[in-house]
Amino acid sequence: MSRFLLTGGNGFIGRHLARFLRERSPAEAVTAAGHEFNLTDPARARELFQAFGAFDYIIHLADVQGNARWSAENAAAQFMANAKISLNVLESWHLCQPQARLICLSSLWAYPEAVADAAEKDYWNGRMHRPTEHYGLNKKLLGVGLEAFKRQHGLRGAALVLGSVYGPEDSTSHVIPSLLARMRQNPDLLEIWGDGTETRDFIYVEDQVQGIFQHLDYNGELLNIGSGQSYSIRQVVDILARLMEYKGRVVYDPSKAAGTACRRINVSLAGQTTGWPANFKLHTLEEGLRKTVNAFIKSNG
């Protein structure tokens, strides 16, 4: 029986991943740690990694995050917190759980801004989007540290690049939960930064969790496991407005930055490795957004 430790286990993806793992393993095999362990504190990080016995997999989800606007406005605080978390997790892994595979999660924000079709070979090929590069750099710091510990100490692990994950129980300020909240709060007018043509690799949370699980034993350095599909912000807004029966005006403001324009995660390497995502049934954007809206309405009335 494999045992799993999830940092950030009470966050959006962490809750779904913990539920997924507990459906396939005894509940006691999955430890999902949340804010009760402040991973910016080396002593608390060490305590977490020592408190629950030996693990086979450590899936590191914990970080300080938000949407592009929030990240730009809180750059220094976000950078410092995530750098501390990354270093403390790497050291605690090495000292307390060297037998475990460490799975670190990265994102499209860590790819260079000029790369529209983000393949693993392009990960270091240019500068990231400047307003949010402090977040992407920490993802790269974590990956470099992981590889350094593998080389020097013979440890095992990999970094997986996720898509733009959405779904029920997301209380973050990411694009889709933010849109839902603002539609509810502003019934007459919805203002959106950018012109709506910006694209992202949106992936429903249950699909992304399955992708993480399928690649826990990947033996390379970096692997993209998004949906491989790109959808525009305007597509998302149109579907959400219809499902939410939103009657207000939707106004796009091209003068305000909305992050880099058109991005897609290239999943060719995952396809060659495991058949991801072609050999797995993923939700369509409509299906995933419908489930997300239904859960939002149920929770918020």
Image: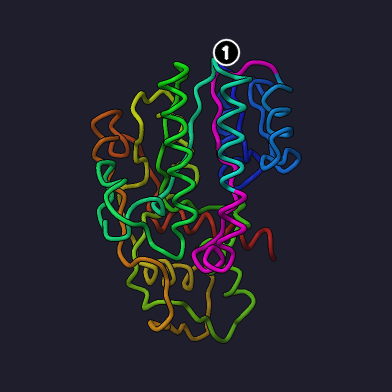
Circle 1 is placed at which residue position? 1
The quadrant of the rendering that contains the C terminus is: bottom right
Which quadrant would residue 71 be assigned to in this image?
bottom right
Q: Does the magenta stretch include residue 5?
A: no
Q: Image point 59% across, 54% down: which residue? A: 170
Q: Position of residue 154 (x, y in %)?
A: 44, 16
The image's colour scheme reads rainbow
* Side (left or right) of 64 relative to 129: right
Question: Against 173, is 31 above or below?
Answer: above
Q: Image point 54% across, 32% down: which residue? A: 59
* Side (left or right) of 264 relative to 240: left
Question: Against 263, is 272 above or below?
Answer: above
Q: Image point 26% across, 56% down: which residue? A: 115
Q: Is residue 211 visible?
A: no
Front one among 74 and 276: 74
Q: Does the magenta stretch include residue 71?
A: yes
Q: Position of residue 109 (x, y in %)?
A: 41, 54
* Number of numbered discs: 1
**Residue density around tag 1, few if under 14, some if 14–19, many if 20 or more, within 10 Å:** few
Q: What amino acid type is highlighted by mark number 1?
A: Met
Question: Against 246, is 74 above or below?
Answer: above
* The magenta segment: 53-81
Front one among 154 and 195: 154
Front one among 292 and 191: 191
Q: Position of residue 214 (x, y in %)?
A: 41, 29
Which quadrant would residue 255 be assigned to in this image?
bottom left
Q: Position of residue 240 (x, y in %)?
A: 48, 68
Q: What element carries label 1?
A: loop
Q: Is residue 17 visible?
A: yes
The extreme front residue here reads 152
